[in-house]
DNA sequence: TGTTTTTTTGAACAATGTTCATTTTATTTG
DNA sequence: CAAATAAAATGAACATTGTTCAAAAAAACA
């Protein structure tokens, strides 16, 4: 089935083309400002074609959402091999921040936009695979820290959530312009500086 | 000037009426789903009237944004009188969480929506008064903790930002459905539980 | 009461997501 | 190779949004 195979491949290519343009435009102009028409125009296809390959705009966001997590996951390849769990935890935090600040629009799509999560709340069997995996990895690191006598008197899951939230919160506030708004002494470096405060606390744990 | 005075009052009343409807609808349906038309219909005025009282939809959001901070500020009246700064810090955290979880849509408008901050980034002289004040109060509490020998080896401003981020991050992730998405053991109580982990850490500081 | 000022109106516009009957292109078949 | 069939692409059309503005209605004033 040569022709059929090629057709499948061509379809995938066009789908990828749409996704790539969507990501490009969306990173350039933001989610709301990126219209289906602009995506279509960018790849020299008509509006209708986009709707042949994606159910609606949300479907595109969902795929990009997944792609974003693949990218974040690749960021975590390095610390995955750090032996000491406490060191790994710190390395992961630094990389998480690096990712968020280098890809603010992608980060927003991944962690603050409601849209990609609506699928989950609708169908209960549905799972947010990427998120669950990433969280599980973080949690296992925290558990390893605990088994090495760190974090005495703490519960793994809430503690993991707290640590994730700490880093996410700083990135989120910074990306949504709340750090400049609040007139910090140096808003540019506040996220890194804030994380170092946490590291100072960790060193005692 | 009886008539003129009354006119001023009437104008204010209508403005308040618009804002109240806007907030109601917006809390019920969300920001994006609340249309100017629905606001107008709700108060039995025409679309055009809304635009007489507010430049655009963003102007409405901005006023609600300010209102939200007044509300949060009133939440903080109680811990304001707690003597011990460390206890005050903890009480503030609990109340912040309470506010966020009780008013998730308002919270989103206040801390994650980009729109209300766009005014600031445009005009540099402009200041985000409410945010600056709230942050200053938190920071002064942290500084008092430091002056009582807590938080040794820490810098006030980054530390304050880190603490704010920690609490904000938990609320933000929960409100944007990331906690249910990640399959936590009990998503409902994870924010409170996460904060208790932080309290445990604070007790050692 | 007639005039002026203020307030309200809602039709109209542009931009957006989305649909679908039609057209174009590609593939298969006789 | 030509006709028939299937697949893919099209873009006009619709509904819904934020927004504007000339006209109408209401209120205030003289």
Image (cartoon, coloured by chain):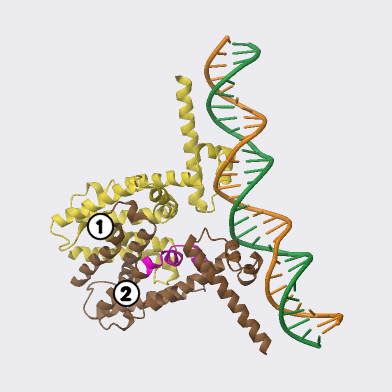
Chain colours: A yellow, B brown, C orange, D green
Q: Is residue B73 above or below residue A111?
A: below
Which residue is drawn at the image coordinates 24% and 60% (left, top)? A159
Please tell me the numbered disc located at residue B48: none
Quarter of the image containing the C terminus of chain B? bottom left
Q: Position of residue B127 (x, y in %)?
A: 49, 74
Q: Are marks 2 and 1 in contact (CB under 8 Å)?
A: no
Q: Position of residue A165 (x, y in %)?
A: 31, 60
Parent chain of label 1: A
Which residue is drawn at the image coordinates 14% and 55% (left, top)? A147
Please tell me the numbered disc located at residue A160: 1
Which residue is drawn at the image coordinates 37% and 70% (left, top)? B99
Residue that numbered label 2 is attached to: B92
The answer to whether tags 2 and 1 share a subunit is no
Q: Position of residue D22 (x, y in %)?
A: 78, 64
Q: Is residue B118 left or right of residue B173?
A: right
On the question of residue B119 being in view, the answer is no
Q: CA distance from mark 2 to mark 1?
A: 22 Å
Q: Position of residue B176 (x, y in %)?
A: 39, 57
Magenta stretch secondary structure, dominant: helix
């Amino acid at each position: 089935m040569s022709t059929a195979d090629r057709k499948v491949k061509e379809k995938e290519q066009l789908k990828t083309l749409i996704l790539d343009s969507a990501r490009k435009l969306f990173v350039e102009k933001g989610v709301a400002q990126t219209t289906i028409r602009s995506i279509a125009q960018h790849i020299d296809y008509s509006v209708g074609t986009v709707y042949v390959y994606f159910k609606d705009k949300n479907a595109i966001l969902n795929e990009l959402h997944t792609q974003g997590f693949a990218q974040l996951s690749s960021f975590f390849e390095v610390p995955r091999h750090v032996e000491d769990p406490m060191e790994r935890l710190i390395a992961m935090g630094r990389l998480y921040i690096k990712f968020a600040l280098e890809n603010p629009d992608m980060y927003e799509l991944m962690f603050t936009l409601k849209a990609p999560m609506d699928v989950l709340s609708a169908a209960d069997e549905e799972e947010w695979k990427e998120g669950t995996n990433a969280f599980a990895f973080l949690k296992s690191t925290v558990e390893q820290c605990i088994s090495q006598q760190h974090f005495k008197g703490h519960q793994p899951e809430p503690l993991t959530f707290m640590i994730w939230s700490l880093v996410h919160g700083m990135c989120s506030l910074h990306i949504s312009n709340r750090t400049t708004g609040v007139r910090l002494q140096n808003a540019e470096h506040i996220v890194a500086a804030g994380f170092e405060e946490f590291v100072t606390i960790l060193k005692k744990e």
